[in-house]
Amino acid sequence: MRLYYLSFLYVLAISPFASCDNAVEINGEYQEKVLVYGLLDHAKDTNYLRIEKSFLNDQINALVLSQDPAQLYYSDSDLQVSIEEWKSGLLQRTLPAERVNGDTLGIPKANGIFASAPNILYRLIAQLDSSATYTLQIIHEADGDTIRSTTQLVYGAQAYYPTKPDVYLDFTDTTKITYYINEADNGRMYELWMHFFYYEKELASGDSVLKHADWQIFANKISENSDGIGFITYSLNRNNFFTFLAGSIDPDPNVSRRFAYLDFTWYIGSEEIYSMYLNTLANLGINENYISPEYTNVEGGMGLFASRLAMPVHHVLLYDETIDSIACGSITGNLRFYSSQTNPGYPGCSL
């Protein structure tokens, strides 16, 4: 029996690589593979990559091995990792990627099958050029192998609704709300999240803390091409907002709550992420024309090296009517939110 455990971060609702191959071995002895997961975002001056290794031991259960960091990570001297910047076929610069422990940087690894500590990442600190092409290069010191992968950056998108901080939204009527954004250059997949921030106060102690509930409004919206021409739109009933709140925040008689603001984040994935998505669908039996054992765009290794653009819209507000509907409406009235200050019964609800 062969078990490969490949641990990766999630992106745009695409599952991390993971496989369990119970087939009879007919292709020779097991060979270690370099596993890559990296997403470059040109809007950030610091990007992180996860680089790990596959493992196999016929004498030890794979679930036991997965909790041993030595089975997951290369040592500091095992790999040379860099990213090359190319324009018009000419190498512009070579950017080193530094091996770091995410735990010391406030980037913990989620608990799961694999060891959660340490959280070894490779950090790239540089302002990226949206018009350039980037090639990841990993040199495996033990055997001299070179692992490579190339991506173009996603850029040029502009959110049209909501567009900017301090705009007001209304979710009280029965019409639909439509979110839209212009398509990005080199972007193929689109996703939108709402982050509902609120203050929660313990009645006994008076202590107050800022919390948030996250709503994935839509995912896996595909553009026809990656030319950056056209719009991505998504419409839904406005009152779905209250259903989201009721399903995300538990009633608690020991607290009071007060709306703070909304943040939105658009995520746009590159062509490589779209190809991985097609492969995932194929292996679920949705489109057998694309079936392959594993999607990878990493030459000499396995994994995903791609581009993603995260576009936040911060501090969006709600009209008083919506705040009152959160506090007093039939769907969310049991969550103990304050009404608006214009409500005659503030902080409660008028008849």
Image: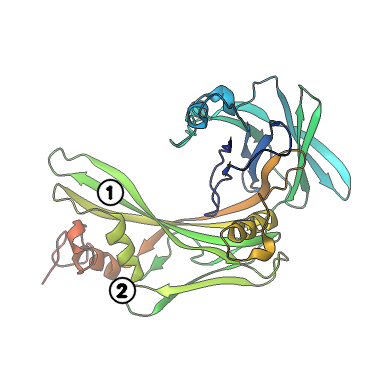
Q: Is residue 83 left or right of residue 12?
A: right
Q: Which is nearer the eye, 295 or 101?
A: 295
Q: Which residue is mark 1?
A: 199
Rendering colour mode: rainbow
Disc 2 crowd, CA 10 A, few/some/many (<14, 14-19, 20+): many
Image coordinates for residue 145, horizontal then vertical, percent = 80, 30
Quarter of the image with the C terminus is bottom left
The residue nearer to you, when weighing 331 against 35, is 35
Res 157 visible: no
Q: CA distance from mark 2 to mark 1?
A: 22 Å
Mark 1 Cα-neighbour bin, 10 Å: few <14, some 14–19, many ≥20: some
The answer to whether residue 129 is above or below residue 193 is above
Residue drawn at x 19%, y 69% is 330
Local secondary structure at mark 1? strand
Which badge, 2 or 1, comes first in the chain's sequence? 2
Residue at mark 2: 172
Q: Position of residue 118 (x, y in %)?
A: 51, 25
Q: Looking at the image, which residue is at 70% across and 22% down? A: 78
